[in-house]
Amino acid sequence: MLRQIIHIDEEKCNGCRLCAAACHEGAIDIVDGKAKLVRENFCDGFGDCLPNCPTGAITFETREAPAYDEAAVKRAQEAKEMNEMKHEHHEGGCPGSKMMQFAHKEEDNTQTSMAKPVSRLGQWPCQIKLVPTQAPFFDGAKLLIAADCTAYAYANMHEEFMRGKITIIGCPKLDAVDYTDKLTEIIQNNDIKSVTIVRMEVPCCGGLQRAAENALRNSGKFIPWQVVTISRDGNILD
């Protein structure tokens, strides 16, 4: 079929791997030191890899290519997550509950301001399972889809991520549900201006990211979006 797909100029590519890391579908691999589109049916044409390329080696082109195979992408993502979980289980314990102790610097616990922190939660309810699919607060909203644990792991969650946004939260592991349909309805039925996905680094959080990405795709809308990953010791990962 004729469709939009990425093109990689190997002469410009420096093999930095940033595009492969940005491609959540796993369409890009590094082969002989160069980025290559090795799975055309995994490329959704969203172009997450474009802004991450420092040399401008990636562009869009319209040509004959296999159709985007969402089911195959989902199977590959689930297999990858299972491998990661098996690896961490082998080392001892569930990856999301592995015992860890963090040595925070003393100054991290020193209050630098007398100002009382202010909640930036813009609405209630905030749980994905409880929030309605249509509501006045979604009109013109910048939507934050956050994993439950992020607010506890990242100290400045309210000011850096929740401020000025409508926040909905969930945990696909504890809720044991695929949020795709619910998120699709929210994005389709409301005037959402942007979407920010904040997840933890643990593999089970991939379910939240995947549901949000699928919802964006299923909605048929072109909405600016980004993914931010928080480490278990409270830092933003590149």
Image: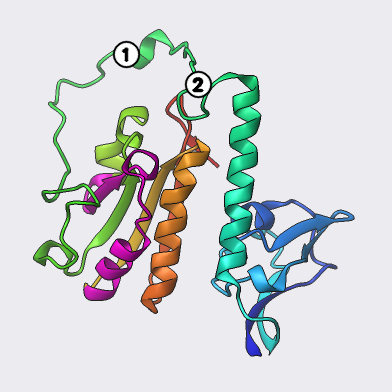
How dense is the environment of label 1, judged by Cα within 10 Å: few (below 14), some, or many (20 and up)? few
Q: Is residue 168 left or right of residue 100?
A: left
Residue 126 point in image, percent of width and height: 18, 48
How dense is the environment of label 2, judged by Cα within 10 Å: few (below 14), some, or many (20 and up)? few
Residue 187 inside the magenta-drawn segment: yes
Q: Is residue 183 left or right of residue 213?
A: left
Spot the residue most to the bottom.
2
Q: Amino acid at mark 2?
A: Lys
Residue 69 inside the magenta-drawn segment: no
Q: Pick the quarter of the image with the C terminus.
A: top right
**Number of numbered discs on residues:** 2
Residue 181 point in image, percent of width and height: 33, 65
Q: Pick the quarter of the image with the N terminus.
A: bottom right
Q: Is residue 58 left or right of residue 160?
A: right
Q: Can you tell which mark lies on residue 109?
A: 1
Q: Which residues are magenta?
A: 162-189
Q: Is residue 63 visible?
A: yes
Q: Amino acid at mark 1?
A: Asn
Residue 193 point in image, percent of width and height: 29, 68
- Residue for point 48% across, 32% down: 231
Q: Can you tell which mark lies on residue 98?
A: 2
Q: Is residue 21 above or below residue 135?
A: above
Say which of marks 2 and 1 sits in front.
2
Residue nearer the viewer, 95 or 48: 95
Spot the residue most to the right.
32
- Residue for point 22% across, 63% down: 141
- Residue for point 34% across, 38% down: 174
Secondary-structure class at tag 2: loop
Chain-order first, disc 2 or disc 1: 2
